[in-house]
Amino acid sequence: MPQADYEKILYLVLDASRFIRAGLRKKGRGAAAAWTGGVLGAVPLNAHMRLGGRRPFAPLQGITVVPIGGIDDGFDDLWSRKLKEYSRRLLACRNAETLRWYFGLSQSADQTRVLCCRQDGRLQGYAVVVREDAPAIGLKRIKIADLFVAGDEPKVVDALLTAAYEYGMAARCHVLEVIGLPETLRRQALTHKPLERPMETFSFFFKALNPNLVEPLSESRGWYVTAFDGDTALL
């Protein structure tokens, strides 16, 4: 897929000590060494995150949090508006019925939440956050599985990223991850200075069987790819 830096995962550390502890356990360190490393490493990592402003800050007016069952007709309205923004873009269906079905497939669907941003009663954007913990190393992880905003409005994107961060903190998670995002949303996410790490393998390859799709899909703006386009709901 022709999008620069798509192979880089963006992440924000929510609990420095436990995040480092999980990383050390992944590297094969024992429980005692991981605990000690977590305590000692938390101070410089917290300083790096806080002094560097590595977290989103935005007003949360109009933000609500709903379970999957709270996906209503407002999502259909947002979907119809989004389709008119750029007709040559390939994007997965995001009407209310499809979203409820897709995110309902996950074994952790009861923990999935939809962060909604409404203005004057109208849905302007949403972010779906899912849990993707790694119990073997003691990591509690929350991931933005989809981010969909009318007009890619920066203020709405900032509000939803801030809401995801605050939700992750309240849920006592250790890290918030973002995979993918179209270029405009990714650029906005980068203004909050997340950390980055490469994926082990590039996760998105395609072959256009229809010759009419070759040209639009050769441009990055022809895509709207988030974790929603993968197997997030099957984990």
Image (spheres, rainbow, N blue to C red):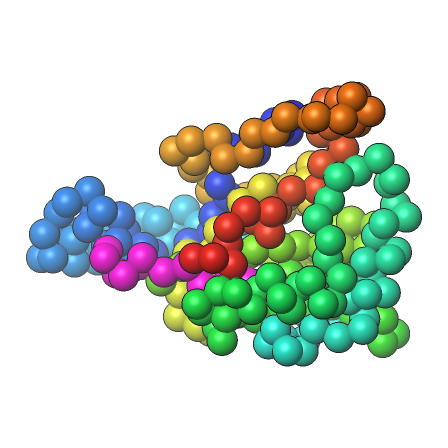
Q: Nearer the viewer, residue 17 or 81?
A: 81
Horizontal and vertical percent position of residue 41: 25, 50
Whether residue 143 appears in this view of the structure is no
Q: Residue at x 48, y 30 (%)?
A: 202
Horizontal and vertical percent position of residue 212: 82, 24
Q: Residue at x 69, y 62 (%)?
A: 98
Membership of 6 in magenta stretch: no
Question: Residue 171 lies in what quarter of the image?
Answer: bottom left
Whether residue 185 appears in this view of the structure is yes
* Quadrant of the drawing holding the C terminus: bottom left
Q: Nearer the viewer, residue 94 or 157?
A: 94
Along the horizontal axis of the image, is 136 left or right of 220? left
Span of residues in magenta = 128-139
Q: Nearer the viewer, residue 190 or 48?
A: 190
Q: Residue at x 69, y 26 (%)?
A: 208
Q: Residue at x 79, y 38 (%)?
A: 89
Horizontal and vertical percent position of residue 148: 72, 55
Horizontal and vertical percent position of residue 46: 37, 54
